[in-house]
Amino acid sequence: LNIVTAVLIDRFGELREERDEIENKKSKSCFICGYESERFDRETKGGFKGHVRNDHSKWNYIYFMIYLDGKEDNDMTALEKQVYEANPIDGICHIQHFPIRKAKVIKEAKGEE
């Protein structure tokens, strides 16, 4: 019984560490572009929270995919069709349309276009 208890306690400790690591990563980097929160806080007016809320809200991406899923193919623009076709229904999400390592506010802060 003591061995089982020790194994359970150890496993719960591992799960807690994994959860804490995930939570730390979520609070320290943007899910969409991957930039660290310190960079936004240092280089932009709105900081990291403003970037995640306004520029790269993961929920906006999800809502957009739901919007595309309910739209007829003939009514889609070329860009919408490209994004929709890159995300098949088989559960595999292709992220080529995500702005990985790109953020408009970072470019604006540097004076780039």
Image (cartoon, rainbow, N blue to C red):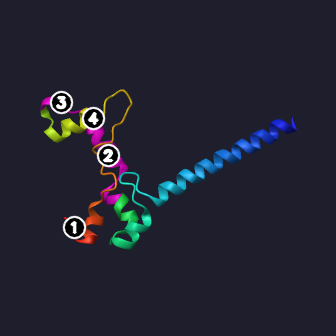
What residue is shown with label 3?
72
The residue stretch that appears in magenta: 53-74
Q: Quadrant of the C terminus?
A: bottom left
Q: Real-space Cα distance between discs 1 and 2? A: 25 Å
Secondary structure beneath disc 2?
A: helix
Farthest residue, direction right: 2
Q: Real-space Cα distance between discs 4 and 3? A: 16 Å
Residue at horizontal 54 percent and vertical 51 percent from the top: 22
What residue is shown with label 2?
61
Q: Disc 4 vs disc 3: Cβ atoms closer than 8 Å?
A: no
Checking the image for residue 112, the label placed there is 1
Residue at horizontal 15 percent and vertical 36 percent from the top: 76
Image check: 67 left or right of 101? left
Mark sitting earlier along the chain (4/3): 3
Q: Nearer the viewer, mark 1 or mark 2?
A: 1
Mark sitting earlier along the chain (1/4): 4
Q: Real-space Cα distance between discs 1 and 4? A: 29 Å
